[in-house]
Image: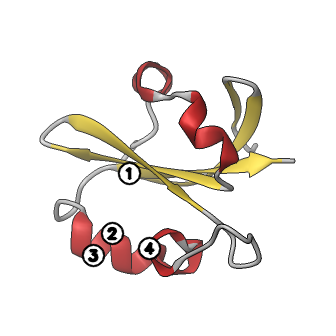
Amino acid sequence: MTKEVRLGNKKYRLKKEYKDGFQLEDVTSKYTDYFENFDYIFGDYSYDKLRLKGFYRKENKNCRAINNIENLDSYIKDYCAFECRYFLLEKID
């Protein structure tokens, strides 16, 4: 069964989770309406602190290399702590 959550005014589907990285309470406390325009929200834990980053689909006019979801694997490798917990939420239109 696919996990779906509501954050702010948007609904999201848990697309990917590594090492039980999705903790609803943590995400809810960090989430702001800033993330509502993004197609995806990626969260990772570094030193037990949650960091959130927005990503876009390639087709989105706001998409740039730094926030293109196709570059997520590179982002994880270059900017996340080695073997950290993480998750990916996809906005449901």
- The residue that appears at 69% across and 70% down in the rendered structure is 57
Residue 13 at x, y percent in the picture: 71, 45
Tag nearer the camera, 1 or 4:
4
State the residue at coordinates (54%, 76%).
64
Q: Residue at x 17, y 60 (%)?
A: 81
Q: Earlier in the sequence, mark 3 or mark 4?
A: 4
Identity, as a three-letter code, of the amino acid under mark 3: Lys
Mark 1 and mark 2 residues within 8 Å of each other at the beta carbon:
yes
Mark 2, residue position: 76
Image position, residue 85 (x, y; %): 31, 49
The residue pinned by badge 3 equals 77
Q: Secondary structure at mark 2?
A: helix
Left or right: residue 11 versus residue 76 is right
Q: CA distance from mark 1 to mark 2?
A: 9 Å
From the viewer's perspective, is the residue at label 2 or at label 4 nearer? 4
Residue denoted by label 4: 66
Label 2: how many Cα within 10 Å (few below 14, some 14–19, many 20+): some
In the image, 5 versus 91, the foreground residue is 91
Residue that numbered label 1 is attached to: 86
At horizontal 68% and vertical 78% (from top left) the residue drawn is 58
Q: Are marks 3 and 4 in contact (CB under 8 Å)?
A: no
* Label 4: few (<14), some (14–19) or many (≥20) C-alpha neighbours in 10 Å: some
**Distance (Cα) linking label 1 and label 3:** 12 Å
Report how far apart the C-alphas of labels 3 and 4 lie in the structure. 14 Å
Instruction: Answer with mark 1 or mark 2, whichever residue precedes in sequence.
Output: 2
User: Label for residue 37?
Assistant: none
Please tell me whether residue 65 is drawn above or below residue 83 in the rendered image: below
* Circles 2 and 3 in contact, beta carbons < 8 Å: yes
Residue 11 in percent (x, y) is at 76, 34
